[in-house]
Amino acid sequence: MCSFLLHRELITEPRRRSSVLYAKLVMAESTIFVVGLTKSIKSYTLHLVSLDASTGSLISSVGVSSSITSPSSFLALTSAKSPHPTLAWLEDTDSYIHSLPLKSDLKGKSTKLRSDMYREIKDVGVSDAGVFMALKKDSTAHVLRMNVKDGVVENIWEFDNSVCPNPISLLYLPLLNMSRQAESPDNTPSIYSGGFDWSGKPYVGSYHYSHALGVCLFFLYLTYPTLTFPLIGCNIPSPRRQRP
């Protein structure tokens, strides 16, 4: 019954039924949020609808001041630790990540993460824990998360693929060239993926092929404790690399 009411409210929403492509459903405790896209000449604009989860009736419908290049340029972030989801997107006009906590009245204000400019955001399978990836223009990769207190997106980690010395890694370090630039002819572009461990905590992995060694190197970022583990050696993050 609720799915029928949801469908009815979306197709009969005044002045929007012919212009909005609804792309994402986000569930909260008592509200269903629907994220839509409105196509302009060169970009898309985000549109939000909130519906009562028990009846499917329309609560609010608003356009979001935004400009994104494709439907993959936004993410819906949720967390079991927060009652409110967050909408995050890569703004085409300034290359910053913007975020908007979602509440039923849709009257929240978006914020901008001003620490870095990006060319791409990635859903690596852990957006249900409020975690995702973003790539800078030089392909430097950052792990970001939704702050469960205020719903704002924050930067928590940078993949620099550096390895601390130990008896094993010291033998291979000259060949591995692990302290590499984000883009290097010695390595293929990194591929990123994420998942959840046996206890439900998220992790993010980065792997690339080293032409120097002829193997695929894998780095795993764990949100607890804050460590990364490479294929060879032990990568303990420096406090200077850890974002507050």
Image (cartoon, helix red, strand yellow):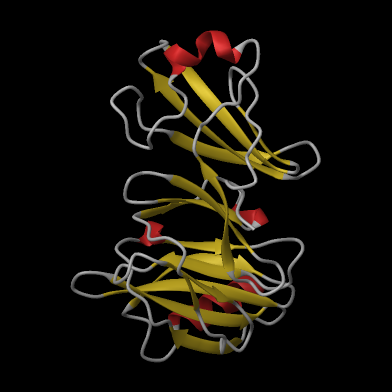
Count the labels in the image: 0
Seen as rendered, the residue at the extreme top is 171
Does residue 113 appear in the picture of this structure? yes
Q: Quadrant of residue 93?
A: bottom left
| Direction from residue 142 to residue 81 in the image, left or right | right
Q: Is residue 66 above or below residue 116?
A: below
> Residue 172's x, y, as percent?
51, 10
Determine whether 137 is above or below 39 in the image. above
Report the side of 79 relative to 98 (left or right).
right
What residue is rendered at 59% in x and 25% in y?
230
Which residue is nearer to you in this view: 96 or 88? 96
The residue located at (37%, 35%) in the rendering is 181
In the rendered image, the residue lying farthest to the left is: 41
Q: Write the residue at 59% across / 79% down.
A: 5
> Residue 121 in the image: x percent, y percent?
43, 54
Compared to residue 95, the image places residue 197 above or below, namely above
Name the residue rendered at 31%, 79% in the picture. Answer: 19
Figure quadrant of the C terminus: bottom right
User: What is the x, y in percent for residue 134?
Assistant: 45, 52
Q: Nearer the viewer, residue 40 or 149?
A: 149
- Where's residue 195, x and y in %? 63, 40
158 horizontally vs 188: left or right = right
In this rendering, is residue 89 above or below 222? below
Quick check: can you spot residue 1?
Answer: no
Q: Quick one: quadrant of the N terminus?
A: bottom right
Q: Nearer the viewer, residue 24 or 4?
A: 24
